[in-house]
Image: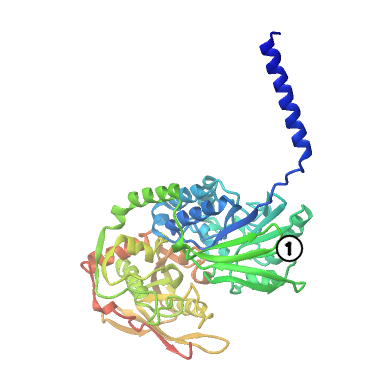
Amino acid sequence: MNKKNIFIATLCLASATLFSSCKSSQPAQTVKEKSLVVLFDNDVHCNLEGYAKMAGLRDAIADTADVIVVSCGDFLQGGRASTLSKGKYIVDVMKKVNYDVITLGNHEFDFGAEHMMNLLKELNAPITCVNFKEHQSGKTLYAPYIIKNYGQQKIAFIGVTTPTAITSERYAFFDDKNQQIYDMSEREIYPLVQKTVDEVRRQGANFVIILSHLGEEPTEYNEDSNGLIANTTGIDVLFDGHTHAVIEKKAIANKSGQPVIVSQTGTKFANIGKLTLLPNKKTTIEHIPTEKLTDNAMVKQVIDSINGLTDKYLNTLVGTCDFGINITGEDGKRAVRNSETNAGDIIADAFRILTGANIGMTDGGSVRADIKAGEIRIKDILDVLPYDNLIYELEVDGKQIETTLNACIQKLPLEDGEFPQVSGLTFTLNINQGENKVSDLKVLNPKSGNYEPIDYNKKYTIATIDYIAVGGGMYNTLQGCKIVRKDIMVDKDALIEYISKNMNGHVGQEYAKPQGRIKVNGTR
């Protein structure tokens, strides 16, 4: 070895010794544990632009905290992009957001269970739902829980979906021979969740979050998010959905009397929920108004691309109107689920007149938005009727019509998505404590133009949507009635044709206000 190499080797050895000496003399560096942030949404109903805001918020937080992004359901349906693509465009955008955990809402089933499950495979996000099962085997279709590890935190997410999906989206759970394929464990929600909470605690979860699509209002199965907490233990936080409430945080006592925080963000990304778990184990929860947030550029690019594909069609002119066609009342509150509206009138008229049926009928829950005065474009029609329901014509006797109407008014004065909007039919709605009833039913005689008392023994034809005819709508009261014609046309196409052709592109003054088809006795 020459002198130069000996010098280099000696220098390297000395450096290594010095480095080793310095390293051993310093105290061990501890890595500071990050905070953990969970961002959550519910009932987005196809507000695509909100996803760019959600991803932008995640980006803003990710430098200083670990971030988990979760959804409490009702993302797949409820807007133009979903109607035109049967949910595919929604999945394309959500994939870019890169959700960590998702649970199902009832409207995920709107295109049928098989279509939903195929779309969710493309979403490539973990899905949890403790109560969606195969009917015969009882096997859950999705994981009952998902556990995530972040530093010292072991977080369990448990998804639970409103059992009313099996009635409101019945067609997704039964085949065309009325054989049941899937279950929602309708009367077992609380014990199912408790069993799952116990399991994740046994696996070492130190924080349990429920992703709930139960809502604040008790259902016909008497199960809701508040009741879930009151009947269980071991839950730390519940993110809720389904009822579109804005609840930043409230405490509900669990079965042991311990407080559990509930939060729900509203709908259509009015807010994004933010739960922060600090290293000292304290938690904070808040709502962040979405309008104040910055877009994520990649997600926004996908949204812009989808909007570009759909804009030309959506902006096609249908007609004009000098007034609003509304689902809301004069007080600005939603009215279509507990009273007659001019939007309900014109839709039911379109069904009746285009099919030639005696009666046109739809449910208030299927009519989703106002149309402002001025130009009416296809995008406005899709906002009102986003669900691609097919029109059926049924043959029903007068007594069955009364039975159906009575079934759909029992929740009044509260809202009910099954509340009827009608054409060719008038009735009085009697609100009594304990039981509501309809009376003075009359059916339009198309020859005379007069309304005549209903004949309980006579057969009438009703033009309605497949959800009501065969899908479980209006509490299954028309299930099994004779189908005269089916798949006549899509509901939105009927309204487009009625305005553009039957009304020559201009909605007349007869629709300026509700026409008085439903009179009310009693206090709302």
Q: Residue at left 60%, top 55%? A: 181
Q: Is 198 situated above or below 324?
A: above
Q: Is 307 situated above or below 288?
A: above
The answer to which image quadrant residue 501 occupies is bottom left
Q: Nearer the viewer, residue 101 or 403?
A: 101
Q: Nearer the viewer, residue 310 or 183?
A: 310
Question: Which SS class for mark 1?
Answer: helix
Residue that mark 1 sits on: 194
Q: Position of residue 39 (x, y in %)?
A: 57, 58
Image position of 51 (left or right of 248): left
Q: Residue at left 37%, top 74%? A: 344
**Residue type indicated by callout 1:** Gln
Residue 163 appears in the picture as rendered = no
Q: Position of residue 119 (x, y in %)?
A: 51, 48
Q: Nearer the viewer, residue 440 or 201?
A: 201
Q: Position of residue 491 (x, y in %)?
A: 37, 63
